[in-house]
Image: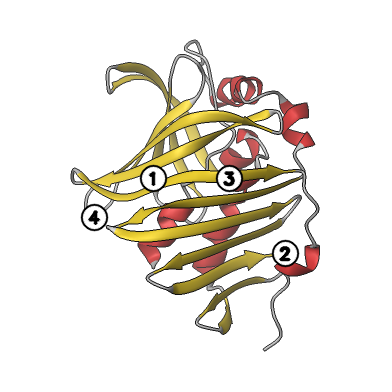
Amino acid sequence: MKKLNLFLSLILILVMGTAASAQTVDDVISKATAAMGGQSAIDGVKSLKMSMTGTLQDKEIEFEVTILKPNNKMIKMNIMDMDIITATNGTDYWRSQMGQVKDMTVAAKEQFGSSFYQYSGASIAGLIGNGTFIYSGKEDVDGISADVVKGAFTGSGPVSMYFDATGLPFKMLMPNEEGDLHMSITDYRDVGGMLIAYKFESITNGESMMALEITEVEANIDIDPSIFAKPAQ
């Protein structure tokens, strides 16, 4: 489950981008905002509901991610006929599995909270702000001259993010004892005026660990805030 939570914290990077001339993290943030549609478009997306399907270590998996800004998030996951819900309303952080509701551990809370910006479309400033990052220059990655930002998200280990010449992230790398995790990020589409990636694949030691594709997205829909509250015991 720890590895799965790590994957979840990286899946949906909605608002990142830069240009080949970027020299600082501030440049990355500025170019990212413009590349993803501009801050006004990002701010204009108040809610998101996304359905995803794919595989996790060859097992079929389904997700439903629901976001209501500024600080409500819920992820429903089904794998091997097991339903797992993780959610927060900004105050309570809880998890439900097999009908049992528990508070998240401190580590899980930090990771779930810091990953909020990946799901919410709240701009790379918020994403990078939940960690420590530097602009480390250019690297040739998969034949692409990429701008590279390196650092760590709060509650997670080191991570490198790679941006192509168009200003969009196409890959992430996270070192791991069991083998480095490589995540590809592709198929960007417009949602409510901002771009989000629709396809993600995580590879370790040459094997696909997880592959996900967004199958449906709704933006700026009415969402009842009460659904994010921790259920009564």
What residue is shown with label 1? 158
| Neighbourhood count class around disc 3 (C-alpha, 10 Å): few under 14, some 14–19, many 20 upward | few
Q: Position of residue 19 (x, y in %)?
A: 52, 15
Q: Earlier in the sequence, mark 1 or mark 4?
A: 1
Q: Earlier in the sequence, mark 3 or mark 1?
A: 1
Q: Tell us which disc is closer to us: 2 or 3.
A: 3
Give the CA distance from mark 2 to mark 4.
33 Å
| Neighbourhood count class around disc 1 (C-alpha, 10 Å): few under 14, some 14–19, many 20 upward | some
Q: Tell us which disc is closer to us: 3 or 4.
A: 3
What residue is shown with label 2? 89
Q: Quadrant of residue 14?
A: top right
Q: Quadrant of residue 151?
A: top left
What residue is shown with label 3? 216
Give the CA distance from mark 2 to mark 3.
23 Å
Residue at screen point 66% across, 29% down:
194
Residue at screen point 19% across, 43% down:
206
